[in-house]
Image: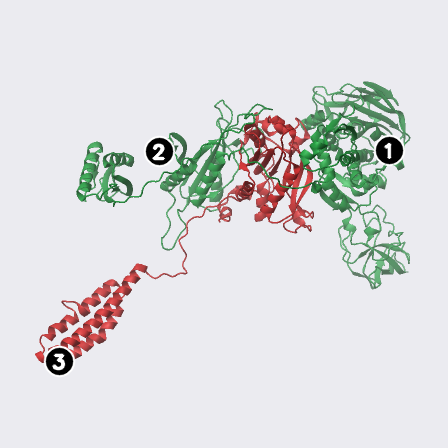
Amino acid sequence: MTLDEFRSAAESLRRDGPAQVAAAGTLDAWTEARNHLVGRTSGRLSELMTALGTLPKEDRREAGLLANSVKQELEALLDARHVELLRAQQQGPSIDPTMPGRADWQGTVHPVSLVIDEVVDIFRELGFTIALGPEAEHPWYNFGALNFPADHPAMDLHDTLYLDDLVLRTHTSPVQVRTLQQYPPPIRILAPGNVYRADPFDASHAPMFAQVEGLVVDEGITFADLKATLTRFANRFFGETKTRFRPSYFPFTEPSAEMDVLCGVCKGSGCPVCKHSGWVEILGSGMVHPAVLENAGIDSEKYTGWAFGMGPARTALARHGIPDIRILYDSDVRFLEQFAR
Amino acid sequence: MNLSHEWLKAFVPHTLAAEQVRDLLTAHVATVEGFERLRADLAPFVVARVVETEKVPDTKLSFNKVDDGSGTLLEVVCGAPNVTAGAVYPFARSGTMMPAGFKIEKKKIRGFTSNGMLCSAAELGLGEDHAGILELTTDAAPGTPLLEVLPLGDVRLVLDVLPNRPDLLSHLGVARELSALTGVPMVNPDAAHAAPVVDVTRDAREVRGGGATVRLEDADGCPQYLGAVIRGITVAPSPAWLRERVEAAGVRSINNVVDVTNAILHGLGQPMHAFDLGTLAEQTVVIRRARAGEKIRTLDGVERALTPEMTMIADATHSIAVAGVMGGENTEVKGTTTDLFLEVAYFDPRRTRKTRRALGLSTDASYRFERGIDPAGLVSAMRAAIGMIIAVAGGRVDGGILGVGAEPAPRSAVALRPSRVRTVLGAEVSLALITQYLTSVGFAVQPAGEALTVTPPSWRNDVTREVDLIEEVARLHGYDKLPDTIEAYRPTTVPDHPLYLTGRRVRDALVGAGLAEVRPMPFVKGDDASHWRVTNPLADDEPHLRTTILESLARRAEYNLTRMLGDIRMFEVGSVFLGKGKGQGVLEEVRVGVLMMGARHPQHFADGAPAAIDAWDVKGLAERVARAAFPGVAVTLVPGDDGALWTIAAGERVVGAVTRVALDAPVWATPAFGVELTLGEMPLAYVAKPRTSAHAGVRPPMAPPAPAVRYTPLPVTPAAAFDLALLVPDAMRAAEVERVLRTSGGDMLESLVVFDEFRGAGVPDGMRSIAWRLTFRHPERTLRDKEIDGRRSQLLKSLENQLGVKPRTA
C-alpha cells in the first residue's frame, strides 16, 4: 500500500464513520458499528493499522498520526452515541402522550350517605357525637317513651311495620330515649339510621329510608339555643341562607317547630319547587317534651333540651336532581358511578 | 282542612288579603300548605260596555260595537235577546278560554267579524241562567277584570291540621285564631238565619219530646247526645249562599238539609246527622253498643258487620247509624222527607277511632270525633243547625232539644310559672303579654302568686301541662320573634358509638378498594323457619327481614345483570335480623356485605383484556376489610367447609366468611364472590326500666384507647434470599408446607412469599410445583453464603422427612 492509498482509505473511514455511528439506533447496533469501525480484530481501523506496518518507514509517522486522529474522532462519536443510547434506554420507548393512563376502579359513597356525612361533620364542629340504636325496636322506645298517646290519631302519622311484639322503628327518636337512659346530661348527640314506614314504594315514598336525629339535653338549654344551632347548621349546609320556624306538632317535643330555609331555586320569591311559598322544609324540631325526660328517668325540672330530625334522602334527591326515590335503592352501577369523587 | 277565605271573613270581618291570612296562620297556628283561587278561570274576563247594537233581521243575532277598554271599539256578534246599548256585561276577548273548555276565536258571521263574546251567567259557570247575557250593575270602567266586580274571588286555604289541634278543623276554630292574631272581634256569621232560642230538656238516660224518644244506653261511647225534631220541611236544592259555603269547603252540594249538616261540620266543627223521622221505628233513637252479628247498610251502600266494641244509633228495631262514623241508608233524608230528626253528639274519641279502623271507613265526622270535638259546643251547634234548616227548608221545631248524658265538666286548670317560660324559651315574655296571649285564644287566666292559674277553653283538649301553655305563648308571640343566641355548651358525656366508627373505617377501606356503597332495603323472600316475618308486609313476595346482607346484594347484582352490567363491586354496611326459631327474640347485627364480579381492572390498551375477579381478589379484600373492622386484632382466613371458601377469624372469633354467590345470571357473567362480616351486635334489651336511667347521673368511664402500632427498628444489615420450588401433592395444603418452612427456617427467616404455582411439563400428575422466596437476615451481621446454603439443605431435609415433599429438580 502506498501512502496515498493509505490516506485515501483513512479519509474514507473518516467520511463513512459518522453516518454509521448515527445510524446505530440500538445498543446492539452500536456495538456492531463500533466493531465494524474501530474493533480490535476485524474493524476497518485495525485493517488500517495492519496496513501501516506495510508502508515505507518514512511514511509511517504521517500515516500513524492520520490513523490516530481518525480513531480519536470515531471514538468520540461512538462514546457520545453510546451515552445517547443508554439514556434513551433508561427512558424507555417513546410514548404517545395522548393515550389514556392506567386507571383502577373508583369506589363511591352512596348519595344518601354523602348527605349524612356532611350533616355529621357540621354537627361535630358543634360538639356532637354519634349514637346508634336498633332498627327492630320495642314499641315503648318507639312510641310510649316518646309521649305518643296510646290509640291516638298521632299514631296515624307513623304507619308502622310490625314484627310480632316489636316494631320496625318509625323514626330515629328511640335513640334519644336509649341515650338518655344510658348517659347523664350534658348530652349532644346525632343519631343517623334507617327507619321504616308502611308506605307503598313509589316515586316519592319508600318503606325504609334514612333519618338523622339530633338531641341536646343540659341545664339551661332553650328554644333560643335550638334556633341558633339549627340556623347555624342550615348556613353551613346550604351556604348563607335564611331560616324560618313554624309551629308544628310532634308528641315528643313541645314547643315543636318545622324549620324552613329559603328556596334554593328562587331564593324566596316563589317558584314551583317551593310551591310558591319561597321556603323549603328541611327538618322538624322542638324542645324535648318533659314527659320524654321523665320517661328516661331524667329530672325534667332541672334539665331542658331540644331535638331535631331530618330526612337525608329528600335532600339528596333535591341536590342531585334525582327525580325518583326508587333510584336510590335500585343500586344500578351506572348510577352509583356518578358519585365518584 | 279546606278553608274558605270568605267564610273566615264572615266570622272575623278583617281586611287582610288571603296571602296575609296564609302567612299569619303559617307563622302562628298551623301551616297553610295549599292556596288556590277558586275562580282563577275567570281571571281573563273583563267588563265591557255595548256602545251600539243593531238587530239582524230574521235572526236572533245582533251586531254590536263594544268598548272593552282597549281604546278601539270591537265588533261583536251576539245571539242574546237582551243586549242593550249603554249596558255593561262580562266580556271574553278572542283567545279567552271559557270555563266549559273551549276558546273564543275571532270569526266571521254574516259579513261581520266577531272579536269576542258577551257572556251569560251559565257560560261563566255562575248558575243555570243562559236566557240572556249577564247585565252587570257596576260603575267600573270597561276593561276592569270581572273578578274585581263580582264577589267570586274566594280563595281556598288548605290548612295542615296536626292531631293535637282538632279545634282547627272548622272555620270557627281558625277564625278564633285569626281574631286573636288580628285583634278583630268575632261575629256570628249565621245571625241572618238564627231561629228563636230553642230550650234543652236533659236527662242522664232518656228524654221524650216532639213525639220522639231518645235513650242513652252507652254513656261510655257517647257521653252526650242531643236530638231535635223538625216537622214540615221541604227538601230542595240549596240556595246559592249555602251551596257556595259547602263547595268552598270542598264538599259537593246535595240538598238543603244535607248541606246544612255539612255547613255545621265545616263551619263549627260539629259533625251532625239528619235522619228521616218517618223512617224511624216508633220514632225512637237509642244509643247503644252493637249486638254481635248486627249489620247495617251505610249511606255509601256498603253492608257492614258490627261488633259489640262499636257504638250504634238504633231505632226501636234496627240500627240506623254507626255512631260518629256514618249514617244508615234506610233512614237517609230523601226528596220526599218532610220530618227530620237531627243528631248532634259527642262520641268518645277512642271508641270512634277503633270503630272506623275496624270498618276501614274514615269520614269527615269520624276524623273530628276521634280527635275530640268541643264538648261544650253541642247546644250552640244544634241551635245554629235548627235556625239554618228552618231558613232554607222551612218547618218548625217540635218538642225542643232533647238531651241525654252529662254536661261536660270544665277543663282542669294548669299552673304556669313565667320563670319557666323563660327557662324553656330563653326569652323574657312579660306577665301582661303572657296573659294577653292566652286570653286572646280563650284561656281563662288567674294570677296565683308568682304563677298563673290557667284554664283551657272547652275546645282545647290538648292543653294539660305547663309546657302546653308555654307552646301557646311561643307561637302567639311568634317563633321568629324569639331570640336565637348560641350559648357556650358543656361537652357531651356520650362517646361515639363504636359501630359507627367501625362502619366508617370499613366503608373507607372498601371505597378505597374501588367498591360502591349501596343502601338497599332489607326485605327478602325468605322463609318463616329462619327469617322474621313482617306482620303487615308491604310486598307479599318479600315479607321477611334478611338474615344476611348478601341476600340484598345478590338481588341488586341481578338487577344490574338484567341491564347487561356485569362489572359489579358493591357493599353495604347495614343490619340483619337473626334469632328466628332460636327462642330468644330478634337478634340484630350490624354487618358489612360485599359482592364482587366482573373485570379485575378497567381495560387498558397496554395490558390486554383484564382478567375476571377471582377468589384470590376476594380473599385479599376480605383480609383488608377485616383488618379495618378490627384494628390491632390478628385476622386469619381459615379454609372453609360448608360452602364457604374461607371463614374470617378476628383473634379467636369467627366474624364472617368469603363465599361464592349463586345468582340468576346470564351466561356471559363472570363468577360472583361475596364477603359477609359481622361488625357487632345492636342490642335490643331495655337500657333501663321505663322512667328510670342506668347512670344515676354519673358519666360512665371512658373506654381505653385503641392499641397503638409498635415501631419495628429498621434493618441495618443486608438480607440474603433464595427460592425453593417444591413438588406439593394436590391433596396437601400449601399452609402445611409453610408451617414446616417457618419452624425449620429459624429465627433469621424474615419473610416467606409464594410467587408461583405451576402444573404441567416436568411436574408429575397429582402434584403441583409451588415456589417460595425465603428471605433471611441477621440483625447484627451479614450472613455468609455457607450459612444460607446450610439452611437450604436443612429445610429440604425437614420437608422430605416431615411431609415427603421434594424440590422440583431442574
Residue in front for this viewpoint, B268 or B259: B268
Mark 1 or mark 2: whose residue is earlier in sequence:
1
Identify the residue position indicated by label 2 in the image.
Answer: B638
Query: Image quarter for residue B255?
Result: top right
Q: Position of residue A128 (x, y in %)?
A: 55, 38
Q: Position of residue B17 (x, y in %)?
A: 79, 47
Identify the residue position indicated by label 3 in the image.
Answer: A3
- Say whether residue B304 is left or right of residue B275: left
Q: In front: mark 1 or mark 2?
A: 2
Q: In front: mark 3 or mark 1?
A: 3
Q: Which chain is red?
A: A
- Say whether residue B241 is left or right of residue A35: right
Identify the residue position indicated by label 1 in the image.
Answer: B389
Label 1 Cα crowd, 10 Å radius (few <14 / some 14-19 / many 20+): many
Of all residues, the one furthest to the bottom in this rendering is: A4
Amino acid marked by disc 2? Val
Q: Position of residue B317 (x, y in %)?
A: 78, 20
